[in-house]
């Protein structure tokens, strides 16, 4: 059973790669960004709370995101088939909570993959995506803030998994298929 997290800066291609991987392994795709965007569109209580953070490119508070992931991971499809987390954890606190939670339900992560792309490429990629998809936080100013938030708050998450010896880095430059091939080569293999 695959229980995977996909790390990488905004614009690294996490969403696209996550979809391909979830199809390959028939596992649910848990994207905190997608869940939050749906909540914003539905104007739910969660959405109203999250919107201002997302509009600025800041992180939604840990306790909010952790609660929604905890709820989602407790659903049957995750416990029986595994899962892929995309966009979570984004802070060390989230990573620690995730670890506690997975220990509690005896379902440890099997793979931690970090998609690596240089900063200089990311802003252009995010801006191009914004023009195509109309994602409001893909404007150049907000994207620049998302990148700086990534370096401040999320880069330590990469170190967290590096220290545990579970992190596997992948070059995120190349075609979608090439990057997918690199990630799949890692995730196909059982964890060591
Ligand atoms: P994404 O689609 O993963 O780039 O997420 C879009 C936005 O949702 C981010 O810029 C944050 O405002 C919020 N968000 C998504 N995942 C998280 C998370 N794990 N922690 C805090 N905020 C998040």
Image: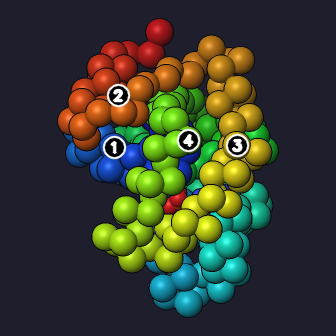
The residue lying at 65 percent from left, 25 percent from top is 161
Nearer mark to the viewer, of 2 and 4: 4
Instruction: Check disc 4 and report the residue beneath it.
Output: 119
Residue 54 position (above or below residue 106)? below
Q: Quadrant of residue 43?
A: bottom right
Q: CA distance from mark 3 to mark 2?
A: 22 Å
Q: How many angstroms separate mark 2 from mark 4 (CA)?
A: 20 Å
The residue at which mark 3 appears reads as 151
Label 3 and label 1: CA atoms lie apart by: 21 Å
Q: How far across and down, in percent of the image, does residue 116 sit?
A: 49, 32
Residue for badge 1: 17
Asked whether disc 2 touches disc 1, contact meaning CB atoms under 8 Å apart, the reply is yes
Q: Is residue 164 above or below residue 39?
A: above
Q: Which residue is mark 2?
A: 183
Q: Residue at x 50, y 77 (%)?
A: 136
Q: Is residue 150 left or right of residue 3?
A: right
Q: Which residue occupies the foreground of this view, 179 or 74?
A: 179
Of the residues under marks 4 and 1, which one precedes in the sequence? 1
* Residue 6 at least partly seen: yes
Q: Is residue 51 left or right of residue 186?
A: right
Q: CA distance from mark 2 to mark 1?
A: 8 Å
> Tag 1's secondary structure?
helix
| Lower sequence index among marks 4 and 3 | 4
Q: Secondary structure at mark 4?
A: helix
Name the mark nearer the viewer: 4 or 1: 4
User: x, y percentage for residue 152?
Assistant: 76, 45
Marks 4 and 1 sit apart, C-alpha to C-alpha, by: 19 Å
Nearest to N terminus: mark 3 or mark 2: 3
Residue 3 screen position, x and y as percent: 45, 35
- Pinpoint residue 25: horizontal percent, then vertical percent: 27, 37
User: From what the image shows, is residue 59 above or below residue 87?
Assistant: below
Q: Residue at 43% across / 25% down in the picture?
A: 170
């Amino acid at each position: 059973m695959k229980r995977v997290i996909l790390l990488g800066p905004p614009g690294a291609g996490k969403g696209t790669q996550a979809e391909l991987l979830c199809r390959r392994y028939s596992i649910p795709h848990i994207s905190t960004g997608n869940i939050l965007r749906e909540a914003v569109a539905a104007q739910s209580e969660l959405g109203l709370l999250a919107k201002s953070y997302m509009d600025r490119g800041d992180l939604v508070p840990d306790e909010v995101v952790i609660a929604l992931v905890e709820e989602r991971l407790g659903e049957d499809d995750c416990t029986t088939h595994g899962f892929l987390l995309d966009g979570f954890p984004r802070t060390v606190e989230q990573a620690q909570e995730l670890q506690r939670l997975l220990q509690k339900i005896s379902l440890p992560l099997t793979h931690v993959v970090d998609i690596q792309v240089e900063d200089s490429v990311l802003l252009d990629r995010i801006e191009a995506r914004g023009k195509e998809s109309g994602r409001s936080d893909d404007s150049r100013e907000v994207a620049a803030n998302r990148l700086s938030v990534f370096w401040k708050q999320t880069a330590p998450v990469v170190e967290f998994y590096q220290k545990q010896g579970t992190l596997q880095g992948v070059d995120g430059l190349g075609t979608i298929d090439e990057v997918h091939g690199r990630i799949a080569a890692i995730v196909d293999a059982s964890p060591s």
